[in-house]
């Protein structure tokens, strides 16, 4: 059956000639990345959700197409019978909102007077002048779309997984691939790029056909599964649209750590400190990451910050992810119950079919979503939970925290469930076992730190989520008695309960 994704892959036509000129101009004036560049290698671990996959998984270098086999993976007497993968889209452009903020900052630099054009202490042009002249090549139409590096992320991931699990990704199973994606263009295109990678694995050297002509399972858009947060009324009301929900994020922006960076950047760029704010500082930091990830260049924006600044800015980003997608509020993770249950429905079906000696209907299930898809699910499962919650006031105490979004959900991050059938099992219960991989590394079980679990034991551990977590109930807004004068917005003043 054809994949049928061609109608989903139409991109709004970009002004290609203008973009090409901008890219050439930008690249000609950029500092091309060299291996081991001290500034880039120093800042790269702190880009949060804007982190390149290879920076979060350096073991893949230098060959990003070669599989990285974790020694903890099961082998020999146990054979993989099903793989369910949740995959974040690849590297993307900034959003239109981020681009507008960058344009605002760029305008501040260009508006500086002659006094600000003076040389720096070394006799060279100052950083503010260099950035004012640095080409602003980002355009509103880019708005979070997948870039070529993002397609490469997906093709390489496909090649590695196909080599790591050849029995599951064999050519005979290609037509039985089950493909699900968010409706966002970057996710649909990530799916298409992954399929191209599989084609490259099956037919090396042969150009891939259009995705619509590939003989794979049909691509299904399912936002209730991959963007569950958009369909949870309680989350939307109490977190997404609640001005108090991100209290700790806003408090940290005005706290001493961020104010220190504000003063340092204002001095470095030679602009009035009152013209800057935390949001502009953060977008400048992310621009360093975007230029690195998209074009492979070190832009002058990277020179604005040192590693101490980067650690503070990473914490600001992690605060947002913690309170909006992680342990900050229970609904953040409970809204992902449907997705968690869907994974186990696939695994249950495979177990039953194997017990009956039937062929596995869907040996490989690939689901393409977002960082906002993966973080709540991992929180639901109990991963990366610190003893104390992340707040605006405990930055120093959280320097060694578990919850670091760039290490968990970089671009192209993936959470993989592998179901095994073990031939030499001593008991029927030991016949089916499960391993989980995060970013291609075996993920120890949250409750036991073991690297493999009997399938029945894993289901029993998550029994509450599998049996008692119903999205319709979890996402229902609490009923406020008629006639109460209580302001509903006060219901979600930030608490420290995790």
Image: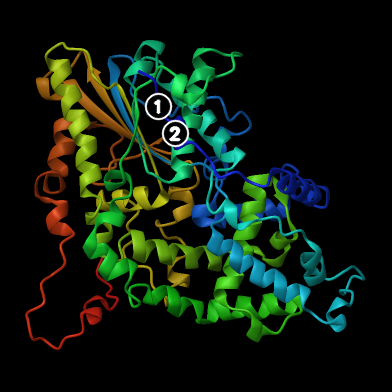
Q: Which mark is residue 7?
A: 2
Using the image, determine if residue 42 lies above or below residue 246. Answer: above
**Residue beneath the point at 74% across and 44% down:** 17
C-alpha span from label 2 to label 1: 7 Å
Q: Which residue is mark 1?
A: 4
Q: Residues within 10 Å of mark 1 (few under 14, many from 20)?
A: some
Relative side of 299 to 5, left or right: right
- Observer-nearest of 186 and 248: 186
Which quarter of the figure has residue 325? Answer: bottom left
Residue 137 locus on image (x, y percent): 70, 55
| Residue at 16 percent of width and 29 percent of height | 348
Query: Pointers 2 and 1 in contact (CB under 8 A)?
Result: yes
Colour theme? rainbow
Which image quadrant is residue 493 in? bottom left
Indicate the secondary structure of the residue bearing disc 1.
loop
- Relative vertical location of residue 312 with respect to residue 294 in this rendering, above or below: below
Along the horizontal axis of the image, is 237 left or right of 279? left
Q: Is residue 42 above or below residue 173?
A: below
In the rendered structure, the answer to whether residue 172 lies left or right of residue 231 reads right
């Amino acid at each position: 059956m054809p994949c049928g994704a061609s109608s989903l892959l139409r991109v709004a036509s970009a002004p290609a000639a203008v973009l090409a000129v901008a890219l050439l101009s930008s690249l000609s004036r950029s500092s091309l990345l060299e291996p081991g560049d001290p500034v880039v290698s120093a800042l790269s671990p702190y880009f949060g959700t804007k982190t390149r996959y290879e920076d979060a998984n350096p073991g893949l270098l230098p060959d990003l197409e070669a599989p990285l086999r974790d020694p903890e993976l099961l082998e020999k007497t146990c054979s993989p019978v099903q793989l369910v993968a949740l995959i974040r889209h690849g590297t993307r452009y900034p959003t239109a909102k981020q681009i507008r903020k960058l344009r605002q900052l760029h305008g501040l630099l260009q508006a500086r007077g002659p006094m600000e054009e003076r040389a720096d202490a070394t006799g060279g042009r100052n950083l503010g002048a260099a950035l004012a002249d640095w080409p602003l090549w980002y355009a509103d139409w880019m708005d979070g779309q997948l870039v070529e590096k993002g397609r490469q992320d997906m093709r390489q991931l496909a090649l590695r997984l196909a080599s790591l699990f050849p029995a599951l990704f064999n050519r005979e199973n290609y037509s039985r691939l089950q493909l699900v994606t968010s409706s966002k263009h970057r996710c649909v295109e990530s799916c298409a790029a992954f399929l191209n990678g599989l084609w490259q694995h099956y037919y090396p050297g042969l150009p891939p056909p259009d995705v619509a002509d590939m003989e794979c399972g049909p691509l299904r858009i399912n936002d209730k599964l991959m963007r569950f947060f958009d369909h949870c009324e309680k989350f939307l009301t109490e977190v997404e649209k609640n001005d108090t929900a991100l209290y700790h994020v806003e408090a940290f922006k005005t706290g001493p750590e961020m104010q220190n960076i504000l003063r340092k950047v204002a001095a470095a760029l030679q602009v009035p400190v009152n013209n800057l704010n935390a949001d502009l500082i953060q977008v400048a930091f992310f621009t360093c990451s975007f230029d690195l990830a998209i074009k492979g260049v070190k832009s002058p924006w990277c020179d604005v910050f040192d590693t101490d600044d980067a650690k503070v800015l990473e914490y600001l980003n992690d605060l947002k992810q913690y309170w909006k997608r992680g342990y900050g509020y229970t609904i953040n993770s409970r809204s992902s119950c449907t997705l968690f249950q869907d994974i186990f429905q696939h695994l249950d079906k495979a177990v039953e079919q194997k017990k009956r000696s039937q062929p596995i209907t869907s040996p490989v299930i690939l689901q393409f979503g977002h960082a906002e898809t993966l973080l709540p699910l991992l929180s639901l499962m109990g991963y990366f939970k610190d003893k104390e919650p992340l707040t605006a006031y405990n930055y120093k105490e959280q320097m060694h925290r578990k919850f670091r979004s760039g290490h968990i959900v970089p671009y192209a991050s993936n959470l993989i469930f592998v179901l095994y059938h073990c031939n030499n099992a001593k008991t029927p219960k030991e016949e089916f076992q499960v391993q989980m991989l995060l970013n291609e590394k075996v993920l120890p079980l949250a409750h036991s730190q073991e690297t493999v679990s009997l399938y029945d034991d894993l289901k029993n551990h998550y029994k509450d989520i599998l049996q008692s977590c119903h999205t319709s109930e979890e996402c229902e807004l609490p009923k406020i008695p008629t006639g109460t004068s209580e302001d509903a917005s006060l219901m979600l003043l930030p608490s420290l309960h995790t």
